[in-house]
Image (tube, rainbow, N blue to C red):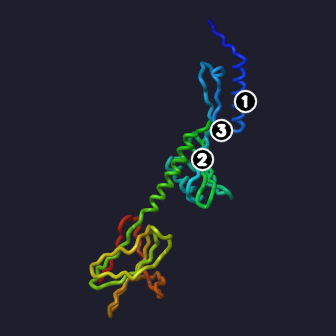
Amino acid sequence: MMMLHYLTDKNVFQVVLAVIGLLSCIGLLNGCTEVVVPGAMAGGGEYYRYTTSNIAKETLMGDEPEITAAARKALTRMDVRVHSVTPYTDETVILASTPELAINIKIVPVTSKSTQVIVDAKEDHIIKKDKATADAILAQIRQALADEASADNVFSKVFVKNNCQHRIYVAVRFLTAKSEPEHWATRGWFSLNAGQKKHIADTRNRFIYFYAETRLKDKRYWGGNDFYWFEGQRFGFFKADFGHETGDITQSFGCD
C-alpha cells in the first residue's frame, strides 16, 4: 500500500524557515555556522546539516615576515601547492591549492610582534567548505613557528686550541647569541698555554674570524685579509667556515 506523507502547517513553517536560512547563508557565506534542515523536509526524521563554517583563524606571536615564512613551510610539509604570495599594504595573501581544494590564507599584522592568520579552505567552484583542512593548516603553521624557535636555541660552542709550544693570545670575531642582542663582536685576548684548549664564544653562525699571536721576541702570528679594529688597532683576521656543523667546534693553532 502506498503511504502518502502530508505536511502539517508546523512542518511547512519549519521548511520555510530552513530554506530562508539556507539562502541567507549561501548569500553571506561567512557568519553562518550551519543550517539544520528538519526531518519533514529531509525524510526519515533525520537532520541533515549543511555546514558553511570553514574559516580557521588565530593570532600568533611573530611579525608578518616570520608568519609568512612559517605558512609557506607548513604548506610545503602538507604537500600543498603555493600559487602566489602577495604582500599588500595591510596584509599578505597566500593562494594555494590541492587537487580538491582552493586555499586562501590572509596574514594580517596586529602589532609589531603579533599577527593574525585566517585560513579559508573550500572545494573549487562549489560552495562546500573544509574546516578540518583549514584547522590542520593553522596547526602546521604553529608547528613551523615552534620548530624555528627551537632551532634558534641551538648554539655551537667555539673552542680554540694551542698546538704550539709557546703561549699564544687569541682574538675572535663572531655573531653573538644566547642572552645578548645578536650582533658581530670582537673579543680577546684569550691566553692559552701550550696544549691548552679553551671555550671562547657561542654562535649560530657558520663563519667565525680569528687572529692569534705569540708575544716572543721572534713574534709569530696567525691572521688573514679581513681587517677589524680591536683595542685601538687594526688586525687582519682569517675567516673560518664551519659549514652546518652543530655542537662543539674547535679552531687549532700550530707552529709547524
Residue 102 in view, yes or no = no
Q: Is residue 34 left or right of residue 176?
A: right
Checking the image for residue 125, the label placed there is 3
Disc 3 crowd rating (10 Å Cα; few below 14, some 14-19, many 20+) is: few
Report the residue that reaches farthest toward the bottom. Answer: 217
Reply above or below: 39 against 147.
above
For badge 3, the amino acid type reads His
Disc 1 crowd rating (10 Å Cα; few below 14, some 14-19, many 20+) is: few
Reply above or below: 89 against 9.
below
Q: Is residue 146 left or right of residue 158?
A: right
> Which one is closest to the eye, mark 3 or mark 2?
2
Name the residue carrying label 2: 57
For badge 1, the amino acid type reads Ile
Checking the image for residue 36, the label placed there is none
Checking the image for residue 20, the label placed there is 1
Classify residue 155 by image quadrant: bottom left
Q: Is residue 240 left or right of residue 143?
A: left
Helix, strand or loop for disc 3: loop
Q: Are marks 2 and 1 in contact (CB under 8 Å)?
A: no
Q: Are marks 3 and 2 in contact (CB under 8 Å)?
A: no
Quarter of the picture holding the N terminus = top right
> Which one is closest to the eye, mark 3 or mark 1?
1
Q: Mark 2 or mark 3, which is nearer the start of the sequence?
A: 2
Q: Nearer the viewer, residue 8 or 98?
A: 8
Q: Mark 1 or mark 3, which is nearer the start of the sequence?
A: 1
Q: CA distance from mark 3 to mark 1?
A: 23 Å
For badge 2, the amino acid type reads Lys
Q: CA distance from mark 3 to mark 2?
A: 23 Å
Q: Position of residue 65 (x, y in %)?
A: 58, 59
Residue drawn at the location 37% of the way across and 83% of the way down: 212
Helix, strand or loop for disc 2: strand
Q: Position of residue 137 (x, y in %)?
A: 54, 46
